[in-house]
């Protein structure tokens, strides 16, 4: 569609650049360089200088008007292309921004998971240390029966396993 329109304008302006049709006193004249024709006959010598000048001036004005229209068309095409280019750049910028946000969110999630894993590890170590300390204290005082000692050792083993799992999870991240 654009190509057809541009081609029509180009042919139209090309046609007018060779011969301009001008109307003066209800008479049609064709102006080609320095010759004036009416109904296909050269009437340049028949017309007086004032009429010739008016016809040449009208032809020049028409030619300038067509050039102006062509320049405006070219400028609008250029502006349209520029707008399309900016639109495309804006779209690409939006895509890059979306990717950046997604990557940032992913990093934030990783950091949050790591912080949670560190917190769980610290809590597990604290519980294991506390249980170990209490067991040693009770064992030192001799207040543990064989059954209680087995329970405490089992509890300490579970807490140590919990610490090992938390460390493994933290290393995984």
Image (cartoon, rainbow, N blue to C red):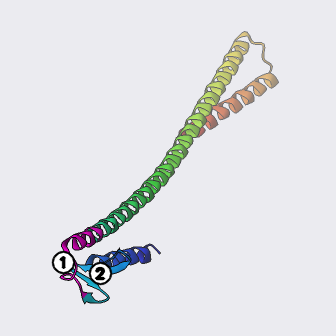
Query: Which of the pair 55/169 is nearer the observer?
Result: 55
Give the vertical position of 169 relative to 73 (above or below).
above
The residue lying toward the viewer, choosing from 60 and 129, is: 60
- Give the magenta-colored segment's residue range: 42-58
Q: Residue at x 56, y 37 (%)?
A: 108
> Where does the image place residue 135, in percent across and percent down from the top left?
71, 18
Asked if residue 105 can be seen in this view, the reply is: yes
Q: What label sits on residue 170 in the rendered view?
A: none
Q: Are marks 2 and 1 in contact (CB under 8 Å)?
A: no
Q: Gap between marks 2 and 1, in whole Å?
A: 10 Å
Read off the residue under disc 2. 30
Queried whether the magenta region covers residue 46, the answer comes back as yes
Q: Quadrant of residue 16?
A: bottom left
Question: Is 164 located above or below residue 90 in the figure?
Answer: above
On screen, residue 170 versus residue 90, left or right, reads right
| Res. 148 image quadrant | top right
Left or right, residue 9 beside residue 132:
left
Q: Is residue 115 above or below residue 110?
A: above
Q: Which residue is mark 1?
A: 34
């Amino acid at each position: 569609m654009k190509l057809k329109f541009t081609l029509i304008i180009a042919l139209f302006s090309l046609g007018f650049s060779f011969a301009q049709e001008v109307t003066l006193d209800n008479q049609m004249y064709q102006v080609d360089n320095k010759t004036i024709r009416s109904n296909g006959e050269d009437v340049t010598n028949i017309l007086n200088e004032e009429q010739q000048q008016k016809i040449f001036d009208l032809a020049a004005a028409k030619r300038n008007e067509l050039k102006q229209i062509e320049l405006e068309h070219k400028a609008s095409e250029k502006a349209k292309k520029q707008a399309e280019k900016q639109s495309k750049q804006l779209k690409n910028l939006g895509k890059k921004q979306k990717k950046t946000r997604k990557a940032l969110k992913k990093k934030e999630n990783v950091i949050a998971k790591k912080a949670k894993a560190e917190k769980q590890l610290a809590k597990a170590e604290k519980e294991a240390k506390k249980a170990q300390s209490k067991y040693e204290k009770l064992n030192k005082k001799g207040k543990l029966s064989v059954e209680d000692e087995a329970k405490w050792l089992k509890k300490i083993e579970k807490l140590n396993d919990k610490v090992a799992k938390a460390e493994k999870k933290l290393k995984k991240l």
